[in-house]
Image (cartoon, rainbow, N blue to C red):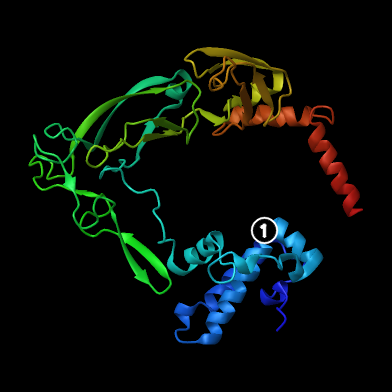
Amino acid sequence: MAKRDYYEILSVTRTVSDGELKTSYRKLAMQWHPDKNPGNAESESKFKEINEAYDCLKDPQKRAAYDRYGHAAFENGGPSGQGGFGGFGASSFSDIFDDLFGGMGGRRGGRSGGRERGADLRYNLEISLEEAFSGKNAKIELPTNVACETCSGTGAKAGTQPVQCKTCQGSGRIRHAQGFFTLERTCASCQGRGSVITDPCKSCNGAGRVVKERTLEVNIPAGVEDGTRIRLGGEGEAGMRGGGNGDLYIFLSVTQHPIFQREGADLYCRVPVSMVTATIGGEFDVPTVDGGRSKVKIPEGTQTGKRFRLGGKGMPVLRSRERGDMYVQVAVETPQKLTKRQKELLKEFDKESSKDTQPESAGFFAKMREFFE
């Protein structure tokens, strides 16, 4: 009986991509797996056929030969002569096994002698804008798991050592057969560590670590921004039974400033000025983030929203000698609670006003008249 076309077996076209080929193979292999269809001879036959087809087409060289010569390319020992179920090689076995049994067929990482790396820790630290500008050395207090001094982190009583687990013989895994496969699971006696403590340390109850409050010094560089993360390697939790320490991550938040707003390395400051100063011009002092002050001169006729740039007066750029700029935005303040005399003077001023005095108002009302006409 002639063999079926490999592409037909896997329900794909000859132009199928590697990813689509693998997806179709996994779907069919799971559908026709003998363990899901016990006692079904047809299922076992199709399962062999599917794996033979995939084992050929997943290999670029075999696929090219098959596309050119068909099954004749493997007449003298090809996929059907590779052992297993008609070319069911190790890689195709692994592909389907991961899907069927969730990756239990091999060791994933594992533990070395029962040692487990400690967890990473997070610490939220709040700083002011001035501290972000100049940088600082901050001291933080952190309650965390540290290595037990009594047993030096082993978890065993002083003078003793963990012994090999008799259930798994130190491997941390238990094997058992299931259908065509040999499966592995974590040893329940030692939780995959491969060793057990027969005489635990009384100070840490065999964990190899105890909770203790630590004081650490954190160097915060100048120019850090809100949300900056600083990593302190090995300053996290101590590992179980002598395992390595995790890392500590400091997350910085910069508090809101009463005067400045920050965008990257630039600072923005809104300054109210009197109507008179904005009209005839003048100058005023503004504070700077480094604790100093700078003078800002404004020309006559300055309008609300006008910005003035103070170069190099912003925040430092992280890990650089450069600094951003500071922008002063003018907000012309309308007088309130005027006296009778002040109102009279403003009315006299308004009578003397012309198109040249208030060009924006004159232009707007001229356009409005044109609109209605």
Q: Amino acid at mark 1?
A: Asp
Residue position marked by numbered label 1 in the rendering: 59
Tell me which corner region of the image, top left, top right, bottom left or bottom right, holds residue 105. Answer: bottom left
Q: Is residue 23 visible?
A: no
Q: Where residue 198 appears, x then y in whole percent? A: 10, 48
Q: Measured along the vertical axis of the image, is residue 121 above or below residue 274?
A: below
Q: Measured along the vertical axis of the image, is residue 275 above or below residue 124?
A: above
Q: Where residue 329 appears, x then y in whole percent? A: 63, 27
Residue pushed farthest front?
76
Question: Residue at the spot x=53%, y=60% of the render?
Answer: 90
| Pick the front one: 16 or 282 | 16
Drawn side of residue 212 relative to residue 366, left or right: left
| Pick the front one: 50 or 21 | 50
Question: Residue at the spot x=37%, y=33% of the render?
Answer: 125
Element marked by disc 1: loop
Classed neighbour count for the residue bearing mark 1: other residues with Cα under 10 Å, few (<14), some (14–19), many (≥20): few
Question: Residue at the spot x=38%, y=66% of the render?
Answer: 182
